[in-house]
Image (tube, coloured by chain):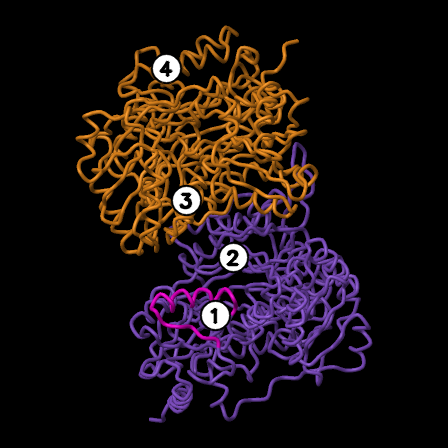
Chain colours: A orange, B purple
Amino acid sequence: MTQHPSRDRIRDLRAELARRGLAGFLVPRADEFQGEYVPPSAARLPWLTGFTGSAGLAVILAEQAALFIDGRYTLQAAAEIDTALIAPRHSTAEPLADWLAHHLKPGERLGYDPWLHSTDEIARHRLAVEKLGAKLEALAGNPLDAVWADRPAPPAAPIRVHSMAYAGESAADKRTRLAQELAQDGVDAAVIAAPDAVAWLLNIRGGDVEHSPLPLSFALLRADATVDLYVDRRKMNEDVTVHLGNAVAVHEPAALGPDLDALGAARKCVLIDPNASSWLMQRLEAAGARIKRGSDPCALPRAIKNATEIAGSRAAHRRDGVAMTRFLAWLDREAQGGRVDEIAASDRLEAYRRENEHFRGLSFSTISGAGANGAIVHYRSGAKTNRKLEAGTLYLVDSGAQYLDATTDITRTVAIGAPSAEMKDRFTRVLKGHIALATCRYPVGTSGSQLDALARHALWQAGLDFDHGTGHGVGSYLSVHEGPHRISKLPSTVALRPGMIVSNEPGYYKTGAFGIRIENLVIVVEAPPIPGGERPMLAFETLSRCPIDRRCIDLGLLNAQEIAWLDAYHASVLADLGGQLDDTTRDWLVRATRPLAPA
Amino acid sequence: MTQHPSRDRIRDLRAELARRGLAGFLVPRADEFQGEYVPPSAARLPWLTGFTGSAGLAVILAEQAALFIDGRYTLQAAAEIDTALIAPRHSTAEPLADWLAHHLKPGERLGYDPWLHSTDEIARHRLAVEKLGAKLEALAGNPLDAVWADRPAPPAAPIRVHSMAYAGESAADKRTRLAQELAQDGVDAAVIAAPDAVAWLLNIRGGDVEHSPLPLSFALLRADATVDLYVDRRKMNEDVTVHLGNAVAVHEPAALGPDLDALGAARKCVLIDPNASSWLMQRLEAAGARIKRGSDPCALPRAIKNATEIAGSRAAHRRDGVAMTRFLAWLDREAQGGRVDEIAASDRLEAYRRENEHFRGLSFSTISGAGANGAIVHYRSGAKTNRKLEAGTLYLVDSGAQYLDATTDITRTVAIGAPSAEMKDRFTRVLKGHIALATCRYPVGTSGSQLDALARHALWQAGLDFDHGTGHGVGSYLSVHEGPHRISKLPSTVALRPGMIVSNEPGYYKTGAFGIRIENLVIVVEAPPIPGGERPMLAFETLSRCPIDRRCIDLGLLNAQEIAWLDAYHASVLADLGGQLDDTTRDWLVRATRPLAPA
């Protein structure tokens, strides 16, 4: 049995901690940009522990170590880490504070790298550590980096201009309107700490991380509408320099600290998001800046897509729908005989997408789950887990692409052979929730959390539920998960606004058996007026174009309005895609979209 | 034309402010107990301005004065105040901060009585005032009280013991379990600043304000389970002294300040709700106490009714249902000929309730709204507004009672003559929302804000909505509006828990035409298990017993499940009440509760 690589790495880290007189060190999954994707150069948590999930926090003490993960990753963590070295802990059932209470002693120093944790996160950890009489200490250099000999170089993918044809609003206009808001609020400068916010503000894209076309960077937006951009100059080129113009000064990342110091020395009022790296807030505080805590000023305007972005999304969804339809038609021909496995399926789907105009990559790793694997919400097929699509099972495929004109994200659940009565019951309840959202009118001012129950009601009535959000915002050739709006059980005060794109993705998961999710992207629109209507109402328009598997539906559970919605949706899918398909695929789509009930 | 009494009073107040060098003074509606009802001795806002609504804030400056009210009170304020003296302002559309920005100058002092505003409220006002370079100043004596010559004496209604037969848990047990929680949280004492919390904790009731059986009082609950009660000793009697026992020390209200000082001097950790009077927090801060801000520790346990309280509520709702049924039967006999007006109707309903065992008064002023008056959400009939119930209109009656064993609150909307198609459409949509809540199963952990949309969905689909909450908590022979839970558009993180009573009261209001509200009280229960159900679910059981007017229903808008719910509800009402009615009323109830659809 080979030794887990964690063993030597944790030993080296502990030696480094001992040299510094530290009792322990926090190793989070995040990098300094606090985003969803982390480049290999910042993949500290997987390097140290072996754990590759998208959320987790390791605590390394001299004698003990633990990895805090949520319920999604219980099985994966146990498979990836050496549990003799590191104890896996459920982050809510067995929280960090309780573990520290057993293992951290009064007076001891627990270190952290202030770049890698948000201000809000550190405030929570501080409470737990100081309650024990111990000390939570921001370190000047990361002790893990000191022992990470073969650390990869940071990425330096070239920045590209995101043209007006896709962005729809010039960077100068964005800078100006946001700067006006800052000035009105008495703010001198805002720290733009999220790379997708920088990319949106300056109409630039990049390729530093998987799946999101981001140039990793920070920026300062000043109330005079100028911007300082802090980015590795190797990513810059003449096109981008010309595009950015005189109002945007480009600096190496190391210049950010002194510039924050200067804001502080001049007693400027600086807006910063408490979800940003705590290093930034700490530097501003130490420099004496007047700090205003608030959301990134790009977040809301970025979420409200303009007419060009909306037209781009509609066009991209038609192309994406063609790829999905070709895939589903192929699947129906090939999979029923048990000849297709999860990886072959996702490869085929990716191949169809690659043929699309403006395709720039997948927007996330395709979730291609056959049978019981479909019940794993964040499943990723691998050589060991790869399953054949077999008769009498459901196949769940959650996928999306980055196109120059939009980002897509869609989930379909398909019957392989004949679905059971239970599968049809659950599928239809998920579909009822999907339709309830798709058809809902709601007053101006409504948040996604107010609508969430509509997507769950049919499941609740059967004693069922699902353990993920119902919808997330989606960027425009940017992050596939984008705030500030969402549809979720979690309280939210962010009202849905016309132009916001959000996913509509209720699901149901039976562990060890099957998973169901039906996901379309929808866009918030003003609801068309109706006779007798008194108030301005909003509604969702469905963007995704792809049939929903009729074979999984228990027609007895749908009412007339629900049937009418699905028939109308299918008719629009056929109308939009039919002309772009080969004969075989079109014939398949005609069958897949025929009305549920005879007219 | 007689002069408005405000004129002299504001003149006198301004003279007093000038003597103190104050630019202005805030006059809120609240008293030091921050409750819904204010005794005449603390009715400062009505005395000064004439405005009698349940929410409002006057600002009196040397030259200007304004009254900030919400949308409910626009018409009422204009009728009650002298608008030449005081400008009525909509508190959200024309907020205080904007008005102050025009009228308050840098360096000026705006005074307030710290007893009359909550900590949270003062924090908001302070932000607005200090932004102008002015000063918000807590005053040691209320300048309005100084000029209020004929101020009534404070109430001193005798305190009564709330017996175990109704309370179900002894005060000693309540003190002990709450004190254990305080001790676990490291809290030395909690300020119990809400009189209904004091009443619940000590199993006492009183009569100092209208409609709520409250003894106005403060208390300190200490981690050793002892209580200090601060109350006018004239309200005490031998029964109560014996009931309170040795663990509860009774003091005059003036002793509270020195006791808070002592907690501070000993560096005790004191829990206090930021919704409590800001005087308390300021005194604790000045004394050096370690302050923990948090909800009143009585709020959640009080909301979760025990078995005795639940049995009491079921019994009281049967009695209340008998009164409502007698009233509605009488109304059907008398009103169709145009012989009944709003006041006669509410008097008759009160007379029926008075005949009930354990009746102790109304739980709020009956809203008896005929025709267009039904569209005024917080309508109160008066000699000037009193309308006859006329054919072709709707009559809305929202009423409730205090019984020794429960507090009730119910709204019915009744057709007088034949309702129009529009009235039936709206009534049925409100009913669909009511039924959606009444029949909903939802997972453990769900808050009322997550369910709110279910009550509005049928209205939203028609472009309609209503501008009040869908449900409020209700006390047990206590306040008819009681937290911490609610069903509302406003975000809430308070999960519904078995034993919580809440109203289910969607509505629809067409200004100048008619109003509809269908309100039952419901109690949260564990949902009975169902085949295939996987998760522990909760549900509502309806407590109120009274028919819903079948004549207002557009049957074509109800689905089979909705019809089944109403028929089953009506059958249970008939079964529970039928045996307690005279023949005529029972015959009426049989007709009123017959199934909507033939079996």
- The segment highlighted magenta reads B118-138
**In the rendered image, residues at marks 2 and 3 fall on the same chain:** no
Do the residues under discs 4 and 3 have CB atoms within 8 angstroms?
Answer: no
**Mark carried by residue A283:** 3
Picture layout, residue A210 above or below residue A541: above
Picture layout, residue A127 above or below residue A341: below
- Looking at numbered disc 1 in the image, what kind of residue is underneath it? His
B120 is within the stretch colored magenta: yes
Image position, residue A85 (x, y; %):
66, 23
The quarter holding residue B49 reads: bottom left
Chain letter of mark 1 equals B
- Looking at numbered disc 4 in the image, what kind of residue is underneath it? Arg
Image position, residue B326 (x, y; %):
63, 70
Disc 2 on helix, strand or loop? loop
The one of A75 and B240 positioned closer to us in this rendering: A75
**Dot 1, how many residues are within 10 Å of its Cα: few (below 14), some (14-19), or many (20+)?**
some
**In the figure, is residue A150 to the left or right of B473?**
left
**Dot 3, how many residues are within 10 Å of its Cα: few (below 14), some (14-19), or many (20+)?**
some
Picture layout, residue A129 above or below residue A343: below
B133 is within the stretch colored magenta: yes
Location of mark 2 (residue)? B470
Location of mark 1 (residue)? B378
- Looking at numbered disc 3 in the image, what kind of residue is underneath it? Arg
Alpha-carbon distance for marks 2 and 3? 47 Å
Picture layout, residue A551 above or below residue B126: above
Alpha-carbon distance for marks 3 and 1? 53 Å
Disc 1 on helix, strand or loop? loop
**Dot 2, how many residues are within 10 Å of its Cα: few (below 14), some (14-19), or many (20+)?**
many
Disc 3 on helix, strand or loop? helix
- Sequence-wise, the earlier of marks 4 and 3 is 3
- Looking at numbered disc 2 in the image, what kind of residue is underneath it? Thr
